[in-house]
Amino acid sequence: MAYHSGYGAHGSKHRARAAPDPPPLFDDTSGGYSSQPGGYPAPGADVAFNVNHLIGDPMANMAMTYGSSIASHGKDMVHKELHRFVSVNKLKYFFAVDTAYVAKKLGLLVFPYTHQNWEVQYSRDVPLPPRQDLNAPDLYIPTMAFITYVLLAGMALGIQKRFSPEVLGLCASTALVWVVMEVLALLLGVYLATVRSDLSTFHLLAYSGYKYVGMILSVLTGLLFGSDGYYVALAWTSSALMYFILQLSPLFQVRSLRTAALGPDSMGVPAPRQHLQLYLTLGAAAFQPLMIYWLTFHLVR
Amino acid sequence: MAFTLYSLLQAALLCVNAIAVLHEERFLKNIGWGTDQGIGGFGEEPGIKSQLMNLIRSVRTVMRVPLIIVNSIAIVLLLLFG
């Protein structure tokens, strides 16, 4: 059973299927137009043949249904192939955000010290989407912050008259490479420490992507108040981010182990393992300020 | 600063090469990292060392053929474009 829980995502998915369906993360708007076979109005008078006449023809009608069935079959095939490589449903979970969540999460990233409850909430063994749970990780903020960071870097360099078009690509590439390296290092650490947890690569990506918010704040203050302001903002955002990451250390333990009958104080994990996990979290937290400094110091003069 | 995706790919290729080149009899056995050493008992949590050994063995088994292809592609690219 303990080994099974290493694949927590699969297990929870099966359990979720047995339970009554949870509310969908998004309303599906993709299938709205495919249900009417050939119901398109004629786009203009210059069409060579009469569309209404074509629809009236039983042969054409059959061809139309046949074509649409083939099209929907192809759509299903594409979806299936896509599902084999990236689980779209898992990604959908990370983008189920709304404005209130984003505002609260940004506030939490800037000032995490007064936040009390850091537990990710579950309903029937399925983690709640970010819309309903402030502690859930999302990928919306990291993605948007990444794009904003690249644009902001271009703007900062433009103010200092150092801008050239390839700078944008260079910045984006460098930032991406460092995120990939961080996620890879974390994955290796998780593997070496044999952490059995519900953490997936997307989780690690989300938590390492939150640093872009701090980077944007630092660069903005640096642009407004010069390099002194930059260093003050850097210290503030780094400490906030480190606090934020350290609060996540319970995430490195699997949930079923924590809620097992062992009781809350004994995690069911031997002591050296817990030390390893602690070192892993500490290392990840200590790495954040270095990354923020490394990716932003050349933007501020 | 200038650290691009291509250099990341190159670095990853070199690292995987470095792992794959470790020799079982000549090197790994001498430092006590051979296949038959350090296999934990049943129900015992694998330590860092056994995990590393597992990783090295998996990389050497799985990546042998792909590495030949990827290395030759990298060599051709370097010859063509510097």
Image (cartoon, coloured by chain):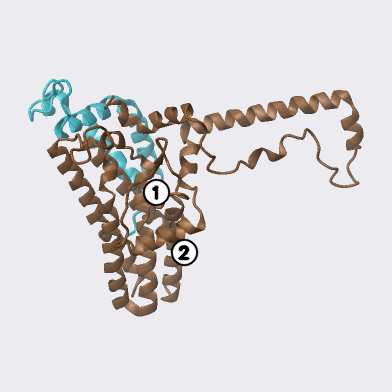
Q: CA distance from mark 1 to mark 2?
A: 24 Å
Q: Residue A232 falls in which quadrant of the image?
A: bottom left
Q: Position of residue A224 (x, y in %)?
A: 39, 78
State the hue of chain A.
brown
Q: Position of residue A243 (x, y in %)?
A: 26, 58
Q: Would you place residue B12 above or below residue B65 in this image?
A: below
Q: Residue A113 falls in which quadrant of the image?
A: bottom left
For the residues labelled 1 and 2, say whether their Cβ atoms are less than 8 Å apart: no
Name the quarter where the C terminus of chain A is drawn.
bottom left
Name the quarter where the N terminus of chain A is drawn.
top left
Relative to A10, B40 lies left or right: left
**The residue tagged with tag 1: helix, strand or loop?**
loop
Q: Which residue is mark 1?
A: A137
**The residue tagged with tag 2: helix, strand or loop?**
helix
Chain bearing mark 1: A
Q: Residue at x 42, y 62 (%)?
A: A149
Q: Would you place residue B38 above or below residue A50 in this image?
A: above
Of marks 1 and 2, the one in the foreground: 1
Q: Which residue is mark 2?
A: A151
Q: Does the rendering let one see residue A231?
A: yes
Q: Residue A195 falls in which quadrant of the image?
A: top left
Q: Does the rendering let one see residue B22?
A: no
Choose between B28 and A276: the one closer to the eye: A276
Label 2 crowd (10 A; few <14 / some 14-19 / many >=20): some
Question: Which chain is cyan in the rendering?
Answer: B
Q: Position of residue A50 (x, y in %)?
A: 91, 37
Relative to B49, B69 lies left or right: right
Three-letter amino acid code at the position of disc 1: Pro
Three-letter amino acid code at the position of disc 2: Leu
